[in-house]
Image (cartoon, grey):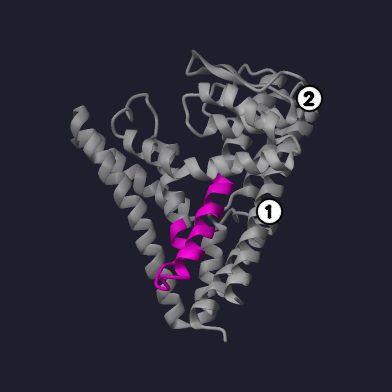
């Protein structure tokens, strides 16, 4: 006998599958209001007010804590209310809302599209256009980047974001599905959106440089904690599908631990080890040269094919997690 809980579980699994398909086929429509845009507007307004009113380290830290808690829990609460309201109006409308909101959490197609806007002119030796396009996605100075430096910047971007823009939202959506099996009022989509809020916060204010040194410290630490588990699971998945798991893990244990970030270094290093390339090194930020630890062994030069292979590895990992979660969901529902 199929219970209401089982029906809910099956429905949420189907929502996950449809959302993944929507991201693969459509991605983020240009003219649609995206939840991240709303989050960004809130963060920007709060930050301007906080920096105007808070003039010392302590008050800025407190403001940062308030911003992080309000945005993460507020995103979860508002999205839950929206979903419940649309479900009350009509179940089909509610399911459509859940699919669209969850699809907005995944950025696999957007990541691929962003990479291609740089790779296409680069392949045609149009370095100027490649430099111009990559400025939208990296924080480093791009005016004088060579072709090899542009390729490294693209690879570092897509392999870092593979975790926090693709795999981690999927992880929290899956966790949310199984929480909702025991707590029916809980919305899996809201958990994924709450993680997205944390990730957006980190990308906007989670810097050690002024003016975000104190205001952004709590959001940066929060995102580090929330990403730690999905990042390690992603590295393990990549290591397994590379058919050289011990080699990949050993390279990560050797190099990733040197990166100041507890997550991005592991993500970038896993891809570098699989592809046989090296990332990291010197980058210029507002004219200041900063050195990042070198990750991986320089066996092959980074080519456009390296970046496309990394995107394919992300897709394989995503599909594996999706397949496992779906299979377990149907098994549990039909136990």
Please state the horizontal and vertical placement of residue 149, each as a whole percent of the image: 66, 20
Position of residue 294 measured from the top left corner of the image (x, y, whole percent) = 60, 18
Q: What residue appears at the point 41 percent right and 74 percent down from the top-left corner? A: 84
Q: Nearer the viewer, residue 34 or 151?
A: 151
Can residue 164 be seen in this snapshot?
Answer: no
Asked whether the residues under the numbered discs 2 and 1 touch, taking CB atoms below 8 Å apart as contact, a structural biologist would say no
The segment highlighted magenta reads 165-191
Q: Which mark is residue 194?
A: none
Q: Residue furthest bottom?
A: 1
Q: Quadrant of residue 265?
A: top right
The answer to which quarter of the image holds residue 272 is top right
Residue at 55% x, 18% y is: 293
Residue placed under numbered mark 1 in the picture: 320
Q: Is residue 199 visible?
A: yes
Predominant secondary structure, magenta span: helix
- For disc 2, the neighbor class at 10 Å (few under 14, some 14 to 19, many from 20) is few
Residue at 61%, 65% (x, y): give it.
328
- Which residue shows up at 30% across the image and 51% down it? 70
Report the quarter where the C terminus lies.
bottom right
Which is in the foreground here, disc 2 or disc 1? 1
Q: Position of residue 160 (x, y in %)?
A: 58, 35
Viewer-proximal residue among 88 and 329: 329
């Amino acid at each position: 006998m199929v219970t209401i809980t089982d029906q809910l579980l099956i429905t949420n699994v189907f929502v996950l599958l449809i959302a993944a398909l929507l991201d693969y086929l459509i991605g983020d429509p240009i003219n649609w209001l995206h939840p991240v845009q709303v989050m960004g507007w809130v963060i920007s307004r709060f930050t301007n007010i906080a920096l105007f009113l808070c003039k010392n380290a302590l008050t800025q830290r407190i403001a940062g804590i308030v911003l992080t808690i309000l945005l993460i829990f507020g995103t979860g609460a508002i999205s839950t209310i929206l979903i419940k309201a649309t479900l009350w109006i009509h179940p089909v409308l509610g399911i459509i809302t859940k699919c669209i909101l969850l699809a907005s959490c995944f950025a696999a197609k957007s990541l691929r599209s962003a990479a291609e806007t740089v790779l296409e002119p680069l392949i045609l030796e149009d370095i100027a256009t490649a430099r111009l396009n990559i400025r939208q996605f990296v924080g480093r100075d791009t005016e004088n980047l060579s072709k090899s430096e542009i390729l490294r910047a693209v690879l570092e971007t897509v392999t870092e974001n593979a975790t926090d823009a693709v795999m981690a939202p999927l992880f929290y959506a899956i966790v949310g599905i199984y929480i909702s099996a025991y707590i029916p009022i809980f919305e899996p989509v809201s958990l994924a959106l709450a993680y997205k809020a944390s990730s957006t916060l980190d990308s906007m204010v989670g810097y050690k440089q002024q003016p975000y040194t104190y205001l952004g410290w709590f959001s940066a630490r929060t995102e580090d904690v929330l990403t730690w588990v999905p990042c390690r699971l992603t590295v393990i998945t990549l290591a397994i599908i590379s058919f050289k798991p011990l080699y990949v893990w050993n390279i990560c244990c050797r190099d990733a631990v040197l990166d100041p970030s507890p997550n991005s270094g592991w993500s970038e290093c896993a891809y570098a080890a699989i592809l046989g390339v090296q990332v990291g090194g010197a980058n210029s930020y507002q004219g200041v040269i900063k050195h990042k630890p070198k990750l991986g062994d320089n066996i092959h030069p980074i080519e456009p094919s390296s970046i496309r292979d990394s995107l394919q590895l992300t897709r394989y990992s995503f599909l594996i997690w999706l397949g496992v979660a779906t299979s377990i969901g149907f098994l549990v529902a039909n136990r």
